Image (tube, grey):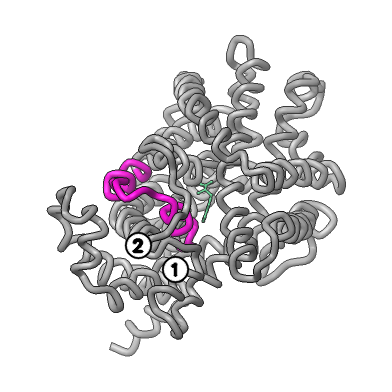
């Protein structure tokens, strides 16, 4: 296919952009929150298994589709299977990206509030207000979190509309390692707190009696969410990969980095949770009420806190950019709308969703969908349903519609890189991944129990 689509400048650029898209609030905020509400170590174990056996094959498959077809999420399915319904995988992805932004932008906004509170020193010096109460007061406030959500969407919009992604990627070359360094410092501080062992036991000693169908579904959801899979984000990114990009190496490197960051986040959070007597199942606020306690125990606490929240906000920004870009690129390319206008449409839509998500911690607390507040409902619908479903269908698509010779040629860059495990990959992509996801769904719906009763 000859075309003049832009490609990433360097090998490092590819890794950076993809890592930037994957590493974000997913591993640092959502992972500890999910682990805490799903009973601890058993979740970690299942999550790691899913990262390796589901995450890598699905990621390689998305890379294949993107670079082979060189177009956006919907366009790629239209190109590869014209006139069929497969492009619905793409529509599912676009909608998922939009809905994810609707709650992700709110949490990103929280990180800005914490930057602000560190700067004006109200976070560490308000007498009589502990960090839990402080967070509750803030998140249930009608205007403040919405203001920060707006600021964050504004930042994302600015990057998308003015095309300065390159600068951001370059900056993250310095920021990501720095974030990593602070995570390690925080881990050391956390594990040396009194009663830290209880947290490590909670994180690493599995109690299999806690392993329910909803824990397994949560682990699948977390694996997809944190690797940015199942919605074509990586299809869009890989459509910009160069012909010599080693997609196999990129896939496992991104997965390892991401898993590592998540485990570090766990080591940073859980010993502190037990040491300060916080409930591990506190929910979405877990990281925000735990970390300030740890910062307080470090020398120069405000400085660490400031740098950490700025870096976390940047990590979130490289992820919101990827989500925004998927929707903007689609509207721009398919509806022949200018990029600017498409970007505005997305930003305004996301802001409306963001208002509803943010208010669901206060004013709209009583308004629930299937027992979940609006924020949680968006999270549930996307991470636990739309992404795994998208991933499953993507595998079925490539497994049934693509000639294995083409697949192998693309993944090995026309035979220039070795892919000894090709058959194992195909086996996983074609059978294991879709069947595993299918079973997890059936299990969660309780259908498996019904079947068991029949036999
Ligand atoms: N993976 C990112 C994180 O962990 C979030 C994200 C970016 C994402 N793009 C995505 C999640 C696409 C699902 C799909 O923070």
The C terminus sits in image quarter: bottom left
Give the residue drawn at x 45%, y 20%: 188
Label 2 neighbour load within 10 Å: few <14, some 14-19, many 20+ = many
Task: Give the SS element for disc 1.
Answer: helix
Q: Could you say which quadrant of the image residue 313 lies in?
A: top right
Q: Nearer the viewer, residue 232 or 122?
A: 232
Q: Position of residue 285 (x, y in %)?
A: 65, 43
Left or right of 295? Residue 443 is left
- Packing grade of label 1 (10 A; few <14, some 14-19, many >=20) is many
When the figure is inspected, residue 259 is found, relative to residue 401, above or below; the finding is above
For this rendering, which residue is in front, 318 or 112?
318
Based on the displayed image, in which of its 4 quarters is residue 3 positioned? bottom left
| Front-lying residue, 362 or 228 | 228
Residue furthest to the top? 299
Q: Earlier in the sequence, mark 2 or mark 1?
A: 2
Provide the secondary structure element on which disc 2 rests. Answer: helix
Q: Residue at x 63, y 47 (%)?
A: 284
Disc on res. 68: 2
Q: Which residue is mark 1?
A: 76
Quarter of the image for the N terminus: give it.
Answer: bottom left
The magenta stretch is 230-255
Q: Is residue 363 left or right of residue 66?
A: right
Residue found 32% across the figure and 50% down from its top: 243
Residue 243 located within the stretch drawn in magenta: yes
Residue 309 located left or right of residue 196: right
Q: Are marks 2 and 1 in contact (CB under 8 Å)?
A: yes
Identify the mark at residue 221; answer none if there is no mark. none
206 magenta-colored: no
User: Which residue lies most toward the bottom here?
Assistant: 454
Question: Is residue 248 visible in the rendered structure shown here?
Answer: yes
Q: Is residue 440 above or below residue 179?
A: below
């Amino acid at each position: 296919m000859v075309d003049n689509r832009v490609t990433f400048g360097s090998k490092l650029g590819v890794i950076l952009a993809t890592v930037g898209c994957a590493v974000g609030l997913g591993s640092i905020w959502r992972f500890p929150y999910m682990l805490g509400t799903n009973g601890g170590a058993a979740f970690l174990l299942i999550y790691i298994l899913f990262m390796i056996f589901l995450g890598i094959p699905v990621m390689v498959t998305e890379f294949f589709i993107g670079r082979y077809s060189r177009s956006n999420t919907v366009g790629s399915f239209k190109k590869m299977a014209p006139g069929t319904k497969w492009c619905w995988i793409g529509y599912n992805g676009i909608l998922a990206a939009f809905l994810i932004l609707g709650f992700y932008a709110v949490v990103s906004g929280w990180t800005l509030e914490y930057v602000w509170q560190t700067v004006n020193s109200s976070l560490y010096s308000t007498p009589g207000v502990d960090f839990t109460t402080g967070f509750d007061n803030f998140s249930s406030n009608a205007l403040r979190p919405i203001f920060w959500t707006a600021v964050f969407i504004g930042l994302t919009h600015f990057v998308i509309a003015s095309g300065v992604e390159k600068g951001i990627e370059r900056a993250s070359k310095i920021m990501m390692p720095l974030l990593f360094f602070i995570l390690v410092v925080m881990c050391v501080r956390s594990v040396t707190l009194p009663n830290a062992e209880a947290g490590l036991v909670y994180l690493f000693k599995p109690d299999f009696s806690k392993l329910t169908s909803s824990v397994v579904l949560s682990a699948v959801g977390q694996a997809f969410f944190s690797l940015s899979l199942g919605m074509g984000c990586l299809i869009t990114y890989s459509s910009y990969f160069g012909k010599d990009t080693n997609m196999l190496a990129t896939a496992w490197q991104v997965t390892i980095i991401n898993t590592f960051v998540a485990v570090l986040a766990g080591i940073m959070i859980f010993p502190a949770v037990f040491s300060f007597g916080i409930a591990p199942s506190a929910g979405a606020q877990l990281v925000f009420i735990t970390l300030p306690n740890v910062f307080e125990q470090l020398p120069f606490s405000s400085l660490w806190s400031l740098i950490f929240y700025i870096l976390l906000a940047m990590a979130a920004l490289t992820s919101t950019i990827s989500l925004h870009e998927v929707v903007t690129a689609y509207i721009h390319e398919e509806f022949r709308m200018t990029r600017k206008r498409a970007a505005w449409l997305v930003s305004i839509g996301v802001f409306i969703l963001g208002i509803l998500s943010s208010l669901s911690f206060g004013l709209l607390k009583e308004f629930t969908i299937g027992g979940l507040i609006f924020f949680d409902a968006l999270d549930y619908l996307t991470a636990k349903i739309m992404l795994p479903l998208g991933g499953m269908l993507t595998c079925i698509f490539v497994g049934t519609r693509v000639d294995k010779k083409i697949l192998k040629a693309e993944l090995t860059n026309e035979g220039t890189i070795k892919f000894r495990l090709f058959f194992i990959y195909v086996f996983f992509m074609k059978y294991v991944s879709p069947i595993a996801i299918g079973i997890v769904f059936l299990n969660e719906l309780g259908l498996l129990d019904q079947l068991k009763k029949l036999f």
